[in-house]
């Protein structure tokens, strides 16, 4: 994997996380409406609710952009010192944590307190997945999803549905 594809893939991840930020803002609004017992469709009514949702979305996007920049900087610093193959277990663990951490964020927003138990469960699940994929991946060969002929023929439809 060359530098361009890594930056492109991380940019796609940043776009996903930006969308996750917008989703978090609206889920926060829906959680507040459920907590106080009024219908969810009142959440977007009024400039104060829209401003609050925009603030949450923009602040989450800013945090993700800063984290992405720091990640790219650290990637290039580490790449100069070590081979990328040596860091594959750490990359796999961090990717698994990033995949599951929105669950902790959403439930923490809905309960208005950080859920440490859920966070440690997610760390444990990410560690188990990383160890399993690292040491037992040869037992379960996986073809890249985009290499399947059905996916190539219906790529546009899949993108539009996703």
Image (spheres, rainbow, N blue to C red):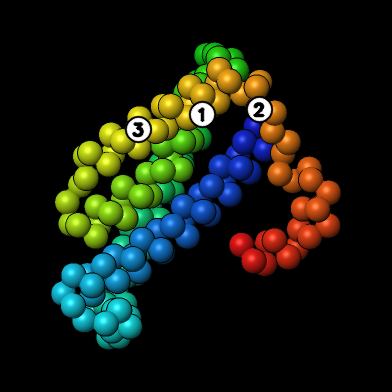
Callout 3 secondary element: helix
Q: Which residue sits at x=35%, y=37%?
A: 122
**Disc 2 versus disc 3: distance between alpha carbons?**
23 Å
Q: Secondary structure at mark 2?
A: loop
Q: Is residue 111 left or right of residue 20?
A: left
> Which quadrant: the N terminus?
top right
- Per the image, the residue denoted by label 3 is 123
Q: Residue at x 70, y 61 (%)?
A: 158
Residue toward you, 108 or 132: 132
Horizontal and vertical percent position of residue 160: 67, 67
Q: Which residue is mark 1?
A: 92
Q: Earlier in the sequence, mark 2 or mark 3?
A: 3
The quadrant holding residue 60 is bottom left
Q: Earlier in the sequence, mark 3 or mark 1?
A: 1
Question: Which residue is painted at 31% across and 47% down in the image?
Answer: 104
Mark sitting on residue 154: none
Dot 1 falls on a residue whose secondary structure is: helix
Mark 3 Cα shell of 10 Å, populated few (<14), some (14-19), many (≥20): some
Q: Which residue reaches farthest front?
A: 139
Alpha-carbon span between mark 3 and mark 1: 12 Å
Please tell me whether residue 140 is drawn above or below residue 14 in the rendered image.
Answer: above
Quickly name the residue at label 2: 140
Q: Nearer the viewer, mark 2 or mark 3?
A: 2
User: Of the residues under marks 1 and 2, which one precedes in the sequence?
Assistant: 1
Measured as percent of width and height from the top left, residue 131 is found at 48, 22
Task: Report the residue at 79% width, 45% height from top.
Answer: 148
Q: Observer-nearest residue: 101 or 54?
A: 101
């Amino acid at each position: 994997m060359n530098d361009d594809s890594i930056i492109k893939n991380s940019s796609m991840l940043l776009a996903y996380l930006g969308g996750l930020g917008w989703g978090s803002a609206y889920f926060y609004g829906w959680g507040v409406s459920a907590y106080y017992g009024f219908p969810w469709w009142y959440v977007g009514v009024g400039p104060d609710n829209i401003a609050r949702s925009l603030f949450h979305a923009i602040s989450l996007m800013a945090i993700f952009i800063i984290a992405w920049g720091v990640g790219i900087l650290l990637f290039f610093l580490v790449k100069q010192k070590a081979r990328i193959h040596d860091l594959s277990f750490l990359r796999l663990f961090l990717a698994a944590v990033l995949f599951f951490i929105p669950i902790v964020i959403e439930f923490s927003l809905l309960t208005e307190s950080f859920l440490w138990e859920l966070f440690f469960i997610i760390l444990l699940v990410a560690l188990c997945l990383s160890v399993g994929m690292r040491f037992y991946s040869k037992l379960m060969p996986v073809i890249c999803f985009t290499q399947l002929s059905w996916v190539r023929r219906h790529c546009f439809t899949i993108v539009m549905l996703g």
